[in-house]
Image (cartoon, rainbow, N blue to C red):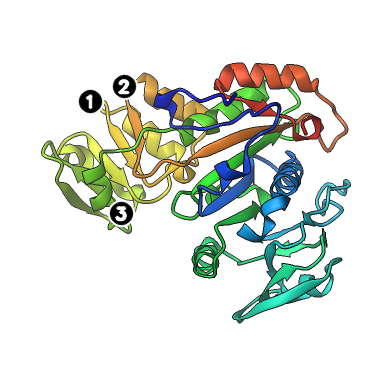
Amino acid sequence: MPISQPADCGLAGWQMFGRMFEVADILKYRSLAIVGLEKNTGKTECLNYILRRVKGEARKFALTSVGIDGENRDQVCQTPKPEIEVPEGMVFVTSEKHFLEKRLVAEILDISEERTALGRLVTARAITSGKVLLSGPADTGGLKLLIARMKENGIQTTIVDGALSRLSLASPAVTEAMFLATGAAVSGNIPELVRRTKFVYELIGLEEVETELQDVLDGVGQGVWAIDSEGKVVDLHLPSIFMLEKMGTDLFRFGNRLFVAGAVSDKLLQYLRVQKQPVELIIRDFTRVFAKPESYYAFLRKGGSLKVVHRSRLLAVTINPVAPSGLVLDSDRLRDVMQEALELPVYDVKRIE
């Protein structure tokens, strides 16, 4: 029986007879990001689990990455890494260099005109299953174009492997849904690991603003804006949040709702926290938050609130109890404590079928 999540958290997870999801659940989304809180949190293991689960319908999927992933040894920690196994029939996108190094038979479908540091991007379909290094578009802009092109060519879901723990890939402006990998590489202390994971989980589940305001803020590219009592969006003519303090009390002449198009830093939250009235801060999505948990929670304790224009959709959380240092946490205890804190199913993909 599926386990549904509380409606107010806006998250979804499935537990079907010990499995993390059903293929139909993933095919609902045009794109899916696999992201890790840190390197070595089991992101590639999570990806390979997903690839094994969807291999029966592999032709409906495409696979790529931002950055390089799939090498058999971590280039920073020099520890062994699982390689990416592409199932027969699946489309994949990688650089010319890594296409030539693939260990499978593939049919080339397209070669892009734009170049990356590792050559042009090659789109191919796997004729046999096998291993490949993924090195896709260099940035999220290129990734968005690639996902759109895949859809035009009959691909239902593009799976994006987020190399280098880039949470930006999980922005709803880039991908529609996400899997989050966490583990002992984040912290060898279970309470601290859970605390840091829960912080990101709470950001992913931030409440969206009303639909009418979404439509307006989608058209705002930069700067700081106020939302007055009637819902009108007013340009404060502040190109950067670093100029906030210069405005003084004029910053709130239209009310206490502010939209910041850029990043949310510790300094910004600290400044808003000491204002006379609680501030509702609106941001594009959770990936814009670069503040520490301490600053975020202090802002909330003073009555502040944080909302997003668009909320991300978290499909599952996975754990890796093994750290690159060799430390091994108790997988069952970590899973149980994490599930209790997050109130959704948590999986060690090496221990499920």
Can residue 61 be spotted in the picture? no
User: Viewer-proximal residue, 138 or 5?
Assistant: 5
> Residue 22 in the image: x percent, y percent?
62, 39
> Residue 119 in the image: x percent, y percent?
70, 78
Quadrant showing the C terminus = top right
Q: Of circles 3 and 2, which is in front? A: 3
Question: What crowding class fits label 3: few (fewer than 14 Cα within 10 Å), some (14-19), or many (20 or more)?
Answer: few
Q: Earlier in the sequence, mark 1 or mark 2?
A: 1
Label at residue 218: 3
Distance between mark 3 and mark 2 Cα atoms = 26 Å
Residue on which the image places disc 1: 277
**Circles 1 and 2: CB distance less than 8 Å?**
no
Q: Earlier in the sequence, mark 3 or mark 2?
A: 3
Residue on which the image places disc 2: 303
Give the left or right position of residue 276, taking residue 289 as reference.
left
Q: Of circles 1 and 3, which is in front? A: 3
Q: Name the quadrant containing residue 16.
A: top right
> Residue 207 in the image: x percent, y percent?
36, 33
Q: Secondary structure at mark 2?
A: loop
Question: What crowding class fits label 1: few (fewer than 14 Cα within 10 Å), some (14-19), or many (20 or more)?
Answer: some
Of the residues shown, which amino acid type is indicated by label 2? Gly
